Amino acid sequence: MKEFLQKRLVRPILQLLTQGITPEKIALSLAFGIMLGVFPVLGTTSLLCLIAALLFRLNLAAVQLVNILVYPLWFALLIPFVRVGERLFGVPPLAMTGSQMLALAHADFLHSVSVLWLTALRSAAAWLLVGPLGIIVLYLILAPMIRRMAHLHLLSGAQAGDRR
């Protein structure tokens, strides 16, 4: 797992730093990628990440990479968002599991849209309660971490230059 995270997350972040992207922009890209990556409407996360990257001038590669990496989290949070949306709107619980919803979407996407569109809207409303705040909190956590990574990376580069 450590090697996976090193290869798929840490190295790409270090590469972005060497391209002159600020730690703050990287942190914001990651925060948007994580929170938009768990937006509970199937098939929308990549488009939302693209729009956010364009609007906020974020690194699209970083946003989309994180969006892809958080897919297991998306699946884990799907039903909680559905349940919160149901409570917000006072409707009875949907008698479907996350797996059943995905199977329906994969079997017949248009039919799944006609069956689940209200559930998707309620889930999106639930996400709106936590998503924007989540982006802010993640940014506040990630920015100092990435600044530290950048500082350590610069120090290790300077030390390597001293050895030459």
Image (tube, grey):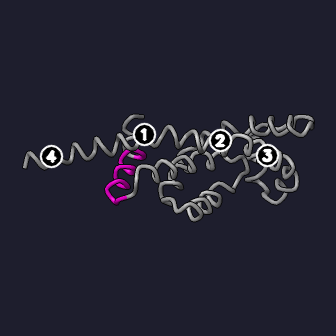
Decide which of tag 1 and tag 2 comes sooner along the chain: 2
Q: Which residue lies at the image location 79% right of the left edge and 39% below the top edge? A: 82
Cα distance in 3D space between marks 2 and 3: 14 Å
Q: Amino acid at mark 2?
A: Leu
Decide which of tag 1 and tag 4 comes sooner along the chain: 1
Pointers 1 and 4 in contact (CB under 8 A)?
no
Q: What residue would you read off at disc 3?
A: 125
Q: Amino acid at mark 3?
A: Ala
Give residue 60's position: percent from left, percent from top.
51, 60
Q: What residue would you read off at disc 1?
A: 144
Decide whether residue 10 is among the magenta residues: yes
From the image, state whether disc 2 or disc 3 is nearer to you: 2
Cα distance in 3D space between marks 1 and 2: 18 Å
Q: What residue would you read off at disc 2?
A: 133
Disc 1 is placed on an element classified as helix
Comparing 110 with 71, the one in front is 71
Q: What residue would you read off at disc 4?
A: 160
Q: Which segment is the magenta one?
A: 8-20
Q: Which residue lies at the image location 79% right of the left edge and 46% below the top edge? A: 125
